[in-house]
Image (cartoon, grey):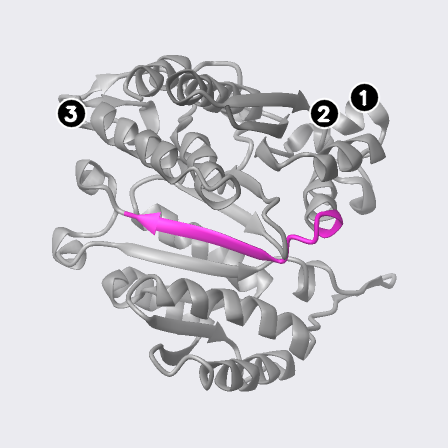
Amino acid sequence: MSEFNIALSPGDGIGPEIVAGAVTVLDAVSKKYGHKFNYTEVYMGGCAIDKYGVPLPQETIDICKKSDSVLLGAVGGPKWDSQPSENRPEKGLLGIRKALELYSNLRPSILKPQLKDASPLKDEKLSNGLNVMVVRELTGGIYFGKRTKGEDWASDEEKYSVEEVKRIGKIAFETAMLRDKRVVSVDKANVLESSRLWRATMEEIAKDYPEVTLSHMYVDNAAMQLAINPAQFDVIVTSNIFGDILSDLSSAIAGSIGMLPSASLGATKCGMYEPIHGSAPDIAGQDIANPIATIVSAAMMLEMSFGLTEEAKAINNAVDKVLNENYRTCDIMSEGMIKTGCKKMAQLIAENI
């Protein structure tokens, strides 16, 4: 029996509901394959502010560091909008990434055939499918830069070192080697000095991967190209803020932000896995959230951190089977489908493991 320690951080809004759904599926995997998953729940985000007064208690950091990986729901919501900027829920998310040294964020956007009608793009734009991996730098750039504020002005610093760009670039090229061997590096090198360093560093990394084709796009053009011809992309590598925006755009093209997972990784096997969507407080507690993004995030955890490839595949196959049987949560609902709640969707997937 393999045993793994998982830190669960349900967080805020719909977070507890979707994480509970993922646990239901993980328990089904545990039962079928004979593994033992030990769960420890931790506080992060708004719920941590309510309980501890800070968005990231030291106890949470300590437990996450001792765990094999972290499964996160979502953080934030208007309830905490009055918090000072240094104590907002999102600071917990940024802080745990820094504490665990998770400098890369992998966000796959795959259009499932069953959800083609849910995409906002016309059929002809999707004729060649959609399978994009956004590799986002996670612990540098403007989100972690120096912040200053005057009486009638404010500024945020965008700063990258060559080493920060090198390590995220290497992950992008290694990822491309397992896919279609194409990398598009997205920057704003026509304007930003940090982007010019980014572009030059990517060119240097490319010399070590002669099989991979590297091209460059300005971020505004990349956003337009994702809407015009998403099939042209294989791996996109970009900075923290650009990756945040482009991965949300690519997820919308795939039909629903409620479908897509992400993995945050560093130098070790310990990672943090989470859906790319937010806490959606407007639908919290109504059993209508889509748990699939969190469930397939758990599948990424099994494969990428625990080496359980077969088990991860079983989860993804179960998701496909349930979708093929026409079950849908409200965000992906269409005519003729069977409307299903968050808890029921997780149960159906678990039953198909």
In this view of the protein, can residue 223 be seen by the observer?
no
The label number, if any, that marks residue 335 in the structure image: 3
In the picture as drawn, the residue positioned furthest to the front comes out as 1
Q: Residue at x 69, y 27 (%)?
A: 79
Amino acid type of the residue that numbered disc 3 sits on in the rendered structure: Glu
Classify residue 140 by image quadrant: bottom right
Disc 2 + disc 1, Cβ < 8 Å: yes
Residue 251 on image: x %, y %: 37, 48
Amino acid type of the residue that numbered disc 2 sits on in the rendered structure: Cys
Disc 1 marks which residue? 51
91 shown above or below 12: below
Which sits in the foreground, 211 or 46? 211
Residue 237 on image: x %, y %: 47, 67
Within 10 angstroms of label 1, few (less than 14), some, or many (20 or more) residues? Answer: few
Classify residue 142 by image quadrant: bottom right
Within 10 angstroms of label 2, few (less than 14), some, or many (20 or more) residues? Answer: many
Q: Nearer the viewer, mark 2 or mark 3?
A: 2
User: What secondary structure is marked by label 1?
Assistant: helix
Which sits in the foreground, 316 or 88? 316
The label number, if any, that marks residue 47 in the structure image: 2
Residue 169 on image: x %, y %: 52, 71
Q: Nearer the viewer, mark 3 or mark 1?
A: 1
Q: Residue at x 59, y 74 (%)?
A: 166
User: What secondary structure is marked by label 3?
Assistant: loop
Measured Cα–Cα span from mark 3 to mark 1: 43 Å
The magenta segment: 98-110
Measured Cα–Cα span from mark 2 to mark 3: 37 Å
- Which corner quadrant holds the C terminus? top left
First in sequence, mark 3 or 1: give its number.
Answer: 1
Within 10 angstroms of label 3, few (less than 14), some, or many (20 or more) residues? Answer: few
